[in-house]
Each structure stands twice: as structure tokens, then as C-alpha cells.
Image (cartoon, rainbow, N blue to C red):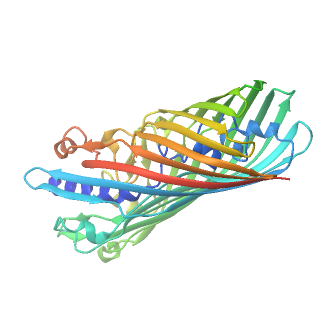
Amino acid sequence: MRKLKMILIGVMALSLLASLSMANGLNLNSLGSKALAMGGAFVGLADDYSTIFWNPAGMGFFNTMNFGLYGAGIMPSGKYSLTVPILGEVVNTSSPSKLYPGGLAAFYYPITENLVAGIGVFTPAGLGASWTGEDVRFLNYPYLTKSYEWSSKIGMITIAPGVAYRIGDMISVGATLNVNYAMFNISQWASYITSPIVFDLGQYSEESSGWGLGATFGVLVKPADLISFGLTVKTPTTIALKGTASISNLSLLGMPGESEVTRDLDWPLQISGGLALKPFPGLTFVADLQWTQWSKLGNADGDIENNYVDPIWHVFMSGPGKATIPLRWKDALQIRTGIEYMVTNTIAVRLGYMHDPAPSPLDTMNFLLPNYDFNTITGGVGIALGSLQFDLGLEYLMGGERNIGYVESLTTLPHAQPGTYNMNILAFGLGMNYKF
């Protein structure tokens, strides 16, 4: 029985194949076409409309009103295979093609010569997955009596009003209040029970959302025209999610078919530092380090707890793997670097590289929150037309293979979903900035 259940868990991992672009866990770290094209190394430069996300202190050096708008498309391509002793290879498949959106909009207004206010709306995090129910039935799992929906969607939208103050000509400090709205939706097979008879519980579906408050603090120092450096701290945030969960066949057992569900999602502390060098006119080198305290995501054990309000559900869903989602992520350090060269006074060419380690251990690799070690190359161009600036950015994320042996999943990695995972992601972004 346990082997059959582990086979099904492995097939459930297929749903991660349509995952959104995740940098350093759940973060989408390429907001703004210029920043994207320069490898996401923008904390020490912070000189365009995306500064509200990267380093709010950059606002302090703006001397005119300006508005920026950025849209992104994210296209993942994944592969998954599973080999089981005796049976051999039972899964070898690729993900369907999908396009996921992201974006940022920001406006800045100089109040005085040294004081600048701004507001931004952006998508700092996201993850999603889906799989066709028919494609998980080929194993002839005896209790999977029909096709069910397998999907997940986790996303965040941030509204960030902020202010920056320039101290003299060299130093600016800034801060934003981050009003975060998050959503967590999931659909999957609800499994089965065997007492007194084998009973298919049917479809499990859940939709929840909630709000949380956080802040970003930044400093940007420009001691000379050829160098600048910055530091950004994003505070931890607790988002209280609340929604409804349902199990389609539970009412046939005389139990409530749905229950209110709550959970606290603890978004971690993030500290970023960056440097920008301009050794020659028209040439800029940038480099960033970003540390994220992913070990604080979840409860003290590193798990996300599901709290079912209905008392019957609370007891029924208290079994292993039902009341918690095991994560146990590790802190991660991301390395980003990039270059910009002004071909003419109005045309810029940009390149970049990013190394992004996976925070999740193999032991908790699962269909909800898959993670990979990504090596990313980026590039793009910018064109200035008077007060109007257009930027195009491209990035290609090459995910490192993650392999979990079937025997390991039964012994040393009990929370893992066995199989071999691969993921590459192509993303593009187009931005527009207008200075009044």
C-alpha cells in the first residue's frame, strides 16, 4: 500500500511542471526591463522607475516627475521522469506550454529639491502549477476512480507607497510601506479511506487569500560619478490567509463537505547589497548579493500549517501530510551581476548573469513548491526618445537537475516526491518610462 501511495505522490509532482518563474524560492526578482537585462543587479544603481522595488533610496536622486510601466511574460519548460523498481520507468513527460504574466507600475513626484514621494504596484512573488487529470491515471492506481483537477496557484501583489530624502549630493535614504495581498489556491485528489470500506474522497479544492504589512528600507550612496553602492532591507511579513476548502465526496459520509481554512504565511527577511561602477563614460558594471532568510518560512519546524475551522474537519484532516505542508527551507544567497554599454547617447545594450540556489532540500521537494538551482543569463536593449524611454529585457533560467530515488523516498527522504526533475524558463519584459 505504501509503495502505491508513493507512486501516486510521484505522479502528483507532475503538477510542478507548469511552475512560474521562481528566483530564490518564490521571489520574482526581475522587475523592470533594465534591471532584468542587467542580471537583476540593481540595488547599487537604482536609477529608473523600478527603484521602488529594488531600492527606494534611489527616488531621492529624481528631480522630475516620472512614470514607469513594465509587463513581463514567463514561459517555463519542464521535464519529469519516475523510475520504480520492478516496474521500470513509469513516467517520462514534459510540461505543457503556458505563459504567466508579471509586472510593475510606479509614479514619482519631487516634493522639494531633496524630498521625493513615490508609489508602486508590483508582483514580487508567484508560483503556479497544473496538470491534466487523465495524465495521472495511467498507473492504474486502484482507488483513483476518475480524473481530478491537479493545480496550484500562489501569488502576491504589493502596493508600496514610499518616500526618499537626499542628504547633500551623495547620500539618499528611502523607505516604503508594503501592503501585500496574497492568494493560495489548490486543487488535487483528496485521497481515500479504507475503513470500513475503500472509499474515494474525491476532489479537494481550496481558495484562500489575505493581507499583510511589511516595509522596505534603503540607502544609496554616490561618493563620485564613477561609483555608487546601496543597501536594502525588506522586513519579515506575516500574511494571514483565510478561505474555504472542500472535499467533493465527504458529504456522502455524513460529514460537512467544506470548511473554512486559515494559515499564516511568514514571508522572510531579505537583505540586499549592490555596487555600480562607471569606469568610462557610457559603461556601467553592477553586482548584487541578496540573502533571504527562507528558514523562517513556516512554523518553528519549517512547515506551513493548515488550520481547518470546522471541528469535524479539524479531526479528520489531522493525519500525516494533511494538516501541514513540509518545507524546511534553508537560507539562500543569490549572486547577480551585469553590464550596460551606451552604443550612442540614446541606445543602450545590456547583459547579465545570476546564480540562484534552491532553498528547499531534496527531502521536501514537492508538487506545490518546487525549487531548482538556477543559472541565468540575461540581455536587453534600451532606447531613449526624448522624455520617453523604452526597454526590452530577456532572461533564460537554466535549472539544475534534481533527482530523488524511489528507494530514498521510502527510507531517508520520507517527505520527498521521487523522480527526476528538470526546469528551464524563458522570460521577457517590456518597460516604458516617461519623465515629465
Please indicate, yes or no, whether residue 75 appears anywhere in the rendered image. yes
In which quarter of the view is residue 113 placed?
A: top right
Report x, y in % for residue 119.
76, 51
Report x, y in % for residue 200.
25, 70
Furthest residue in direction top, as rendered: 223
* Residue shown at the point (87%, 27%) measured from the top left: 168
- Say if 43 sits above or below 106 in the image: above
Furthest residue in direction front, as rendered: 344
Report x, y in % for residue 172.
79, 31
Please indicate, yes or no, whether residue 44 appears anywhere in the rendered image. no
- 28 or 203: nearer the viewer: 28
- 384 or 31: nearer the viewer: 384
Q: Is residue 416 left or right of residue 344?
A: left
* Residue shown at the point (31%, 54%) measured from the top left: 79
Report x, y in % for residue 237.
60, 43
In which quarter of the view is residue 249 placed?
A: bottom left
Q: Is residue 103 left or right of residue 320?
A: right
The quadrant of the image that shows the N terminus is bottom left
Furthest residue in direction right, as rendered: 112
In which quarter of the view is residue 189 placed?
A: bottom left
* Residue shown at the point (29%, 74%) measured from the top left: 253
- Say if 70 sits above or below 292 in the image: below
